[in-house]
Structures are given as structure tokens and as C-alpha cells.
Amino acid sequence: MPWVAIVCAAIMWIILLFLFNKETAPEPVVVDPAVVATINKEWPTVGKQAFASCAGCHGAEGQGGIGPKLAGNEKILKDPVYVHTIIVKGKGGMPAQTQLSETQVYAVANYVLNSWGNKIEEPLTPATVAEGQTKIDPAVLKNRSRFVPEDIKLPEIFLATFVMVLLTYGLIGLYSVWAEGMELHPGIHKVRSTPLATLGILTTLGLTVLFSVLFVRQMVTDFAGWAAKEPVAPNVTAEGFYAAMILLMLAASIALYKKFFMDGEVLVEDASGEFPW
């Protein structure tokens, strides 16, 4: 039964991921041929006019000021789509430029990417933006990093809860069989440690300390990134991995202690238990 529970949890988890993935695809960018045709023609003039409102922060020659320097900026040359994203969505102190039309957005983006020493091989077009998009929307990824996503729906809540219940049931069952055997008999159960068990518990405790240090270092790095002038997104994957490994190593240490170092006592043999183990 514990193995059945774990297999069912795995199936439910696959279904849960399928539900999430249906909602993580970015909205498709509509490639308007008319916009593409006018980009090369209009960006030198339209882009320069639209950038006039940006000069107060970024400088008339892209030299920077309140906003970051744009002239000779290798970051935007390596990822031109980033410029489009910042113009449309904003970042930090820069608001989204919702007053610009689609033509103006591409014009000012190409103006920035082809001025003051900047130069890209091909102009930025809707097709380029569509190709450069990630498969998962950044807003969704940010939401997933929280403990309780704001947009989580009832089917996802049900499946996630069911998965946790099944996993807990299965793991407790497997642990019970491993630590205490298939049957419990009345009396005091003496345990005997082995050199391998001693090595195992020392190893798991050492790994707990190691992952704790790595977790603290990662948190310090992420906090420093948030405090920087240009904030860097935290490495949520590393934080979660280190935290999970700390819990797993502690659980393994406790399990080894109970199995090989802790005497037990069974007062009554009960064959009418509700659990299959």
C-alpha cells in the first residue's frame, strides 16, 4: 500500500504540472506585416522623437543619469528583446511607456539599439520579440516562487493537497516497515548500532551543516542582489534545493538514530490497525 500511494502521488503530480503548464505559455505576439515594413523606414525619425521624453533620465546621448547608461551598453546589444520588454513593462523606477504606440515602441527601441555606438545586425521586429520570448512567462515564475501563488485555482489546490497526503502516507509506511518491521510484538526491542550506521548518521549530520552554510550564503547573496542599484532576481531554485536538502538530511539522521540507536517498547500487539503496515 505505501508503494501504491507513492505511485498515485506521482501520477497526480504529473497532472498538476500539466495544469500549470497550460497557464504558463506567454501570450503570442501578433506579427503585423505593416509594422515590420515601417520599422526600418521610420525608426531614425520616429524613434528619435519618442526618445526625447526619455532623455531626462538616460541623457540626450544615452550617457545615463537617473536611468542607466544606454550608450555602448553591451547588455542590451546581447539581448535586444530586453529593451522592448523594459519599454513595454517598465522596471524599477522606469514606468511602462503605455503612451507609446506599437510603431513608436519599436522605433525607440531600434533607435536606442542603433545609436551612440550601439549597433545590431537586424532591426528589432515583432518576430524577433516572439522568438526571444521564454516559454514561461516571468510573472508566472515569480508567482510560483511564493509559498501560495495568488492565482492558484481549486483543482490545483485539490491535486497539490492530495499529492502531499499520498506522499506522506506512503513515506510513513515505508519508513515504518524499514524501522520497525512488518509486525510489532509486545516487549522491549533492543537495537544494536553498526559502524556503517554510525558513519551514516555522522555523514548526514555533516551534510546538514554543509547545506545550512550554503543556504545562508545564498540568502546573503540574494539580499545583496536586491539591494544593488540594478536588482538581480534571487536564485529561488538554489534556495529551495538547499532548504530541502537540510530537511532531508535531518530526517535521515533521525531515521538512522531510531533504527540503530534508540531502543523501543511495544506494550500491546494490535492486529486490528487501520493502516496496512
Image (cartoon, rainbow, N blue to C red):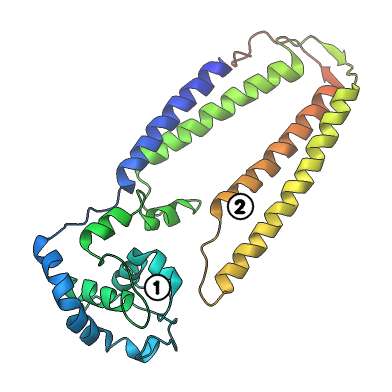
Q: Where, quadrant-wise, is the N terminus in this rendering?
A: top right
Amino acid type shown at disc 2: Glu
Q: Horizontally, is 37 left or right of 185 in the view?
A: left
Closest to the observer, 12 or 196: 196
Closest to the observer, 180 or 3: 3
Number of other residues with Cα within 10 Å of mark 2, as a class: few under 14, some 14 to 19, many 20 or more: some
In this rendering, does residue 30 appear at all? yes
| Looking at the image, residue 124 lies above or below residue 208 | below
Marked residue nearer the N-terminal end (1 or 2): 1
Question: Residue 202, located in which quarter of the rendered image?
Answer: top right
Determine the secondary structure under disc 2. Answer: helix
Residue on which disc 2 sits: 239
Q: Horizontally, is 74 left or right of 131 in the view?
A: right
Q: Residue 8's x, y, as percent?
A: 46, 22
Q: Residue at x 21, y 81 (%)?
A: 44
Closest to the observer, 43 or 159: 43
Number of other residues with Cα within 10 Å of mark 1, as a class: few under 14, some 14 to 19, many 20 or more: few
Q: Residue 19's x, y, as percent?
A: 34, 38
Q: Horizontally, is 110 left or right of 157 in the view?
A: left
Closest to the observer, 136 or 148: 136
Callouts 1 and 2 close, C-beta under 8 Å? no
Q: Horizontally, is 224 left or right of 158 in the view?
A: right
Residue on which disc 1 sits: 91
Cα separation, mark 1 vs mark 2, equals: 24 Å
| Looking at the image, residue 22 lies above or below residue 72 | above
